[in-house]
Amino acid sequence: MKRLLSIREVPIFGVLVLFFGVAALGNHALFSASGLHDLLFTSSIICLLACAETLIIVMKHIDLSISSTIGFSSYIIGKNASNGHGLLYCLILGVIFGLAVGAVNGFLVAYLKLPSLVVTLGTLYLVRGLFNQVARGDFINSDKVPHLLTYMADHTFVKVPYLFLVALAMAIVVGFVMRHLRSGRDLYAIGSNLPAAHLAGIAVEKRTFWAFTAAGGIAGLGGAILLARFGQAQANSGLGIELSVVSACVVGGVAIAGGIGTIYGAMIGALLLQTIVMALGALGVSQFWQGVVNGALLIAAISLDKILSSRSQRTQIMRVSA
Amino acid sequence: MKGSSRHMQKNKLKAVLATAAIAAVAFVGAPTQAHAAGLKIAIMPKAVNNGYFTAWNQGAQKACKEIKATCTYLGPTEATGPAQVQFINQVIQKKYDVLVISAADQNAIVPSLNKAKAAGIKIVTSDADVATSAASSRVVAVLPAASARIGTAEVDWIAAATGGKGKIAVLSAAATAANQNAWIAAMGPYLTQKYPNMSWVGGTVDKSVFYGNDDPTTSTAQFDAILSQYPDVAGIIAPTTVGVLAAAQEKKAKSATVHVTGLGLPSQMAPYIEDGTVEKVGLWNPIDLGYVAVYAGAAAKAGTFTGKVGSSFKAGAKSYSVVAGGIAYLGDPFTFDKSNIETFKTIY
Amino acid sequence: MQTILEIHGAAKRFGGVHALVDAHLSLNAGEIHALLGENGAGKSTLLKTLAGVHKLDAGTITLFGKDFISAGTRGSLEQGIAVIYQEPNLFPDLTLAENVFIGRQLVHGKTVDWKEMVARSSALFTRLGVPLNPLRLARGLSIADQQIVEIAKALSLDAKVIVMDEPTAALSANETERLFNVARSLRAEGAALVFVSHRLDEVMALCDRVTIMRDGSTVATAPISEVDTDKIVKWMVGRELSDLFPKAPAVIGETILKVENIGRTGQFADISFEVRAGEIVGIAGLVGSGRSEVIRAIFGVDNYETGSITFLGKKMQKNAPSKAMRDGIALVPEDRRQQGLFMPVSIARNSTITLLKSLSRFGLIRKAKENASAAEWAKKLQLKFNSLEDSVDRLSGGNQQKVVLAKWLSTNPKLLIIDEPTRGIDVGTKSEVHRFLSQEAAKGLGILMISSELPEVLGMSDRILVMREGRLVAHFDAKDANPENVIAAASGANA
Amino acid sequence: MMSKLSALRGNIGWDKGVGILLLVTLIVGSLITPDFATTSNLGFVVQDIGEIMIIALPMAFLIIAGEIDLSVGSALSLVSSTIGYSFAHGISFGFAILIGICVGAATGALNGFLVNYLGLQSLAVTIGTMGLFRGLCFVLLGNTPVNQLPDFWTGLGVNNIPHTFLPWSFVLIAPLVFFAWILLHHTKIGRWTFVTGISAEAARFSGIPVKRFKFLMYVATGVMVSLAAIVYTLRFASASPDSAMGYELTTIAAVLFGGVSIAGGFGTMWGVIFSVIELGAIRSVLQLINFSSNALQMVSGALLLFSVAFPKVIELLKSRREARVKKPSPSLASMRSVE
């Protein structure tokens, strides 16, 4: 059966284990069960959104709007729950909202052929402004959060936090689609060589549209996880996490140039970044230096990605007789 | 709408307070018209869509109704100096009489405040003041309590919770928040003198501060960092409503044993006090802060209050005098615990 | 022999260029059919039509008795035709198995059947005698192996017609032999192969029949047994040489460019030659013989490891095109659209991009002077256009080449390096370009010209160098060069 | 290739469109609220857009040349923090400014090196340098911003040029704007910027030193960012590690709204200048009529989407109309050139 990690993820997984080890040496608590629990619990949101973002980056696009989508969806779910609606009803509303934002992105990028950076930058502002306008000063208190969500936030299943399990389940589903379904494989083809994909008869517009819509849907569902995770929802929920999601994907081997990268790699990237934060905290490195380390790590990951791909590209151009 | 019933309850209580205020005024006899009616007052929070400042604005609007002034609640969506400056310019442009403002950045807004002052606008800072070196840019600062008082009170609350022993850490807001740094500086020496077998996790107080940047994500992450860096920490003080809420939620989620206290809105902290996650939190009443600041501004505009040290002004029933630094203090913060959380959680 | 493919009266026009005029080709099952012709004879356009990239303006294509519909490579594949380009266009980030089954992955139920795809593709690879690992990525695969993947893709749809465009250009001797065995085994299984190549020795060794095209039409079709290389060359060249190329004898000045055994691993090795003022030096050779790589090194676009180049007595700095330009070298590159011009930009701006310093005063570009220079050169080159502000992508191939010439000759260089001066240009404009080049040479300009069109090399050059597999293999003066010995040297046939 | 052609047709008129939109905003603004067209309010608008205008100029060059820089906000904050840090440690304010400019140039050089000599993707790598520079701000200043800057300098930041409504920063911004317009549309540098954005390979074959040229463009961006940092520091009379938050996205939105195509090769300086002023003016009008600041955020998002969607829709309609006139062109554009 095919190896779980393609050659691209092995070095990054290695760095993850190495860093976790170093951090644990510095502070034994980290290595304990609760340390592992904290790591999985804290990075559950980024892992979930990494599934959505990987779908997009693999097609050589980018989606900056997921942070506004997940924030607004968490408020929608919280508000409806506090108005007495059932959890399922609220979840469906959140996902529908996410799908709608994704569909707008998808339509503008796939059918109007507009650059995805500009479109999702526009929807990032648009949805955040809409969210502020609707939510204003309103605050969803932790006692209004549906009980199942608070239960999931506080409990684990065989030591693994439920919230991470949700992210893992999403990763498995999206990973399966990208690995085993035609629609998923076509995303790689689109990202790897767009003109050839058109000529090979791949329905590029359809695939692109549904990928953006799905990414929105995942962010919509993520709203429930965000609400559970922080026990509250307000106008600045989810603000600014889009760049850390993109960083997690890039560190996890999902190439910005498209065509390369898996969901598992992106998850590892998310866990790696969170481990770094915890390791620096555990080693007593002041918060101020963490920003520098994160920035430097991302640059190193991109350079590694470039070196990896360019070395294996040096084909023998032509024959020079002896 | 289901929420309205809570609203009804609030009105009932306000009615009670209002009648008390009117009675007091009647009792003292009609005061000289301390301020001309029809003032234009701008109420500017650090950022609009924030629960704490919604309560702050309620107090201000109540005062405006009482002095028959027209008050507009305006401000940026994110709490940065440059964003707030745009709105201060608008206040200057629209020729308001009084500006009641909570400084989003203690330095960045000073030049604009000076311009407003030059334009004849009376400025009162409330909840968050400008840098001490720039005190002249505003008439008076209406603050809850002296920094020392707020700092020492929080140390007393955590000491009560931890039984006067163990290591303590601080989960603050933004690294550059002036009021936070002032309170923390006051906490430092007080803890070591008053509670001999209590100490700071990092040795001194400024090595034990973690910055949550007033957003849930970072505050929660920094709470985890404290636990992982100092597993034996006994108590965490979070002198910010966002920080203490995130700490309580994270403590409950991870069923940690560390005691948590700090400055928290009763309505947000109620569930955690009721289920025992947090023993006690304190806060002043933001409604009062807004209320008193409007009166100060109106009095300054009418010329009956100069803001000099020693001068005083009336706000509703009570009178407030200005101490060193041009500051009027409201008094010690209220504390909320199992006993009184029920009543306060519906007010703010 | 049962006829599989019949092409009759195929015609196709791109703007002013008549790529195909009256081409016809017939293919029988179990046959390797060579399609020969000079560059610009229309071979590639015919292939692209079969590949579903172009649609014919006129003429019919019948495949297995039915009409062929041109609709993308997938459409052609499903109708049974596979076209393999010289540089196959694979998906670098996907595995070989996926490349073979792209767009139509094998499924059982809803999910992709990896095991089946891996098994089927490795079976195809072994059948072709090249045991490639289906799980490796296509990135980094040698050209020869990429071709195997393309052929495997054709076989996976049991395509009966496989067209190969210059497949052996970048292959080593044993890779070529391996490819031939594959071709022979496919022929034995009843497939029809079209083999497009310049290597006459390979054509004679491998093919059953040969069709020769010239100027967009088919001029001859014959079984290989009835022809030899000379006859083929006659058909390919056809035209008398002299009348086409009015090369006035020029006064040869002193040496301006001296290249001393430069080399770059994998591309070319110890190349030495000279170019003198007023002289046109032509470099002949097959596609992939390293000629373009040599001139890119001279101009400084690419680096070179060994040897040195002196220009006008001064040693040239490596890897510095801007310096070479300032010293007086001009390069008209091989690919007009990607390298020579900025397609969406106006004629005026394209032709003055190399003159900006001289057209500016105190750093400001003087528009009047810019338009004047562009207009002057447009007149000199008899450029057909309606306004200088039109973008160059509206011009015909010939006029586009004139703009590139204007762009470089306006810097009045000492040496003009020009790669495929008249590729894809209509015959009329072609002779204008030739006449212009010889006029400039007569004024003392040294020209180093690369061309795959034999008549052009023979007609225009004072001296002819021939390159094969990255080396200089022959050197002729104009008077004692002829098509036969040049082609012989270029294609390595019994020299 | 196709997207560049559509950008050409769509964008030719766009900068004039923004100019007209600005005119409309000014007229409507002064009609609906008396406070808008007063000298003091216009002075505020000019001050508000000062830093964004300075950064938008090099950002326009970068995007037209086919690159981008997300680190300008953090770089501005780093320069401001450096000036504050040096001044707080006894260095004269004038000298501190020079140090700041060098640091700004260094941030540009780092970006330029990573993008051009290491060949990394500019979008991804500048997300990295954004985090790096922001982190360095906190390393420098920690939790103590620097205030009480010398009055002479802060006076420059706050007061207007005597007898006018224009702030002193206008003396720096106006020449920069004029110089940038000349540079882009009337000099060799500008011509090189356009052609590099259309095809870097063809530019290299035209004797343009593409790598070095783009590297110097990033360094120039660093210097311009430091000028913006000086204006910023003087305007707010302080230097703090969390300054200029989100400036990079605001600047990119303004440049794109100005008609510059994200694919590179197209755009006009006038479009960008009008766009920065227009976004400042429309914000001022909306604020003066008490339009909620949430809606303001929505308006800028909508304007950004409109600026790219509108020309494309026009172009699609035009090509559909052309298609009905003559035989529809083959749907799959031919990849390779004619041979």
Image: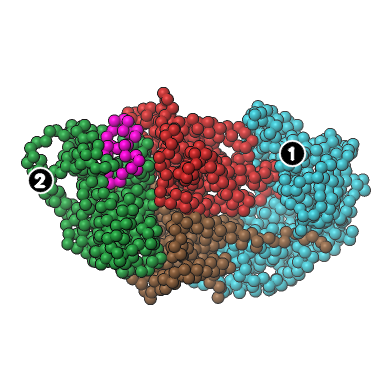
Counting from the top left corner in percent of width and height, residue A30 is at 43, 70
Which residue is at 20% across, 32% downward? B302
User: Which stretch did the figure color magenta?
Assistant: B114-140
Residue D11 visible from this viewpoint: no
Say which residue label 2 marks.
B19
Which of the chains bears the disc numbered 2? Answer: B
The residue nearer to you, when weighing A308 against C382, is A308
* Above or below A60: residue B130: above
Residue at x-position 14% and y-position 33%: B33
Which disc is residue C326 wearing?
1
Mark 2 and mark 1 in contact? Answer it, CB < 8 Å.
no
Tag 1 secondary structure = helix
Amino acid tagged 1: Arg
Element on which disc 2 rests: helix
Identify the chain of the residue marked 1, using the numbered disc in the image. Answer: C
Query: Is the same chain shared between marks 2 and 1?
Result: no
Estimate the x, y position of residue D90 in percent, counting from the top left: 48, 42
Quadrant that contains the N terminus of chain A:
bottom right
* Most foreground residue, B302 or C321: B302
Q: Residue B112's x, y, as percent? A: 36, 36
Percent from the top left, x then y, of residue C233? 85, 53
Task: Residue at the far right: name it.
Answer: C480
Rendered red, the chain in question is D
Identify the chain drawn in green. B
Residue at figure coordinates x 29%, y 60% from the top left = B193
Q: Name the colour assigned to chain C in the rendering.
A: cyan
The answer to whether C375 appears left or right of A12 in the picture is: right
Q: Is residue A243 left or right of residue C367?
A: left
- Chain A tint as drawn: brown
**For residue A190, above or below residue A39:** above
Q: Amino acid at mark 2?
A: Thr
